[in-house]
Image (tube, rainbow, N blue to C red):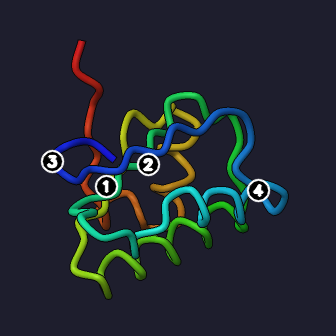
Amino acid sequence: VSPDGRRTVHLAGSLDLQSRDLLLASAAVTSHGTTAVVVDLAGVTFIDSSGIGAMVELAGDASDADVAFSLRDPSARVTRILEITGLLDTWPIETAQA
């Protein structure tokens, strides 16, 4: 968690049934002082319904805890999946600063 309370979770590879629990555990919003959760998707090459479900669950947890939720740098493939599922406009999408 950064000094301003932002928790950034960097993911790589596949976001699927095998990795969903790791995402949920590493991005827990219940930590005191967490003001925002950012899921960095720059390294994600594959995402399935389990991964999408984990992000929906995490976003719901963040909302319940009054913590901001956003995505960072999804690849074209992940962006397309978010578009197909109707979630692309649901969450703010950030770009990494150079």
Residue type, label 1: Ser
* Separation of marks 3 and 4 at Cα, in angstroms: 30 Å
Q: Which residue is mark 4?
A: 16
**Is 58 situated above or below 71?**
below
Q: Secondary structure at mark 2?
A: strand
**Mark before the other along the chain sequence, 3 or 1:** 3
Q: Is residue 61 left or right of residue 47?
A: left
Of 3 and 83, nearer the camera is 3
Q: Quadrant of residue 88?
A: bottom left
In the displayed orientation, state which residue is furthest to the bottom.
64
**Is 78 situated above or below 26?**
above
Identify the residue at horizontal 53%, vertical 59% (top origin): 84
**Mark before the other along the chain sequence, 1 or 4:** 4
Of 26 and 96, nearer the camera is 26
Q: Secondary structure at mark 3?
A: loop
**Is 64 situated above or below 45?**
below
Q: Quadrant of the C terminus?
A: top left
Residue type, label 3: Asp
Q: Which residue is mark 2?
A: 39
**Cβ–Cβ under 8 Å for marks 3 and 4:** no
* Separation of marks 1 and 4 at Cα, in angstroms: 19 Å
**Cβ–Cβ under 8 Å for marks 2 and 3:** no
Identify the residue at horizontal 19%, vertical 43% (top origin): 3
**Mark before the other along the chain sequence, 2 or 4:** 4
Q: Which residue is mark 1?
A: 70
Q: Nearer the viewer, mark 3 or mark 1?
A: 3
Mark 2 Cα-neighbour bin, 10 Å: few <14, some 14–19, many ≥20: many
Residue type, label 4: Asp
**Cβ–Cβ under 8 Å for marks 2 and 1:** yes
Question: x%, y% of residue 54?
Answer: 60, 69
